[in-house]
Image: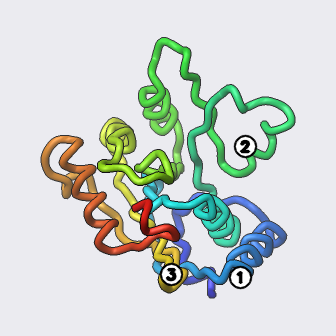
Amino acid sequence: MKRVGLISENMPRQGSVVSRAIGWTVLKLLGWTVVGKFPNEKKLMIIVAPHTSNWDYFLAMGAKFYLGLRARYLMKSEINIWPFRGLLKWTGGVPVYRFQKTDILEQTIDWINGEDNVWLGMSPEGTRSKIDKWKTGFLRISHGADIPILVIGFHAPNKTIVIDRLVPLKALKGDLTAQAKYLQDYCSDKFIGIKPQNQ
């Protein structure tokens, strides 16, 4: 698995030779590989689907460290405490404050707007259990911050993490529910998760 062909100039970066080796080892031990290439965008929303197993987290972290990608994710502010604070920050966690007057989505949009180069990753299902329809929070953030959506898929039959396609917001039609349904159907048709029964 060659890392050089996967990354792009504007990909936010972090890590060292050691962290990349750790990520490579995780993927190698689990038998997974990464294919595709990241787009050359300074800001974007990454959706990773289908999310069907606890193993998804370890695969995502393995790929993230191997690629040297600084992908951020939202976490509850309550867990942003010692001794977890440093580890969560290192892995890309961004605390959100659920009890402030502004809601989490507004906080996230403001945070993205204040950054020069940021890629935010989210699981649109919000759970690894089977659900009928995706949540629309990731779309509200994407539209609010005016950033495109990068689809990354877990395809368990050949153990591949696929950097799939960049979806510009103008390519999405209808209200947020319809947009989420389109992306959900697209991922369901193209990818099979580790536990397909949860898809």
Q: Secondary structure at mark 1?
A: helix
Mark seen at residue 154: none
Q: Which residue occupies the foreground of this view, 29 or 137?
A: 29
From the image, tell me which residue sits under label 2.
89
Which residue: 36% across, 56% down?
149
The reply to whether dot 1 and dot 2 touch (C-beta < 8 Å) is: no
From the image, tell me which residue sits under label 3.
35
As drawn, is 127 to the left or to the right of 67? left
Looking at the rendered structure, the kind of residue marked 2 is Lys
Q: Secondary structure at mark 2?
A: helix
Quarter of image, res 89: top right
Whole-number angstrom distance, CA of label 3 to CA of label 1: 14 Å
Quarter of image, res 74: top right
Looking at the rendered structure, the kind of residue marked 3 is Val
Please determine whether, in this image, residue 176 is positioned above or below residue 33: above
Please determine whether, in this image, residue 152 is positioned above or below residue 116: below
Q: Which residue occupies the foreground of this view, 17 or 86?
A: 86
The reply to whether dot 3 and dot 1 touch (C-beta < 8 Å) is: no
Q: Which of the two discs, 3 and 1, labels the residue nearer the N terminus?
A: 1
Q: Secondary structure at mark 3?
A: strand
As drawn, is 7 to the left or to the right of 90? left
Please determine whether, in this image, residue 70 is positioned above or below residue 7: above
Mark seen at residue 28: 1
Which residue: 74% across, 80% down?
29
Which residue: 47% across, 52% down?
129
Farthest-out residue, top: 101
Specify whether residue 49 is in view. no
Whole-percent x and y of residue 20? 75, 71
Q: Which of the two discs, 1 and 2, labels the residue nearer the N terminus?
A: 1
Q: Which of the two discs, 2 and 3, labels the residue nearer the N terminus?
A: 3
Farthest-out residue, front: 197
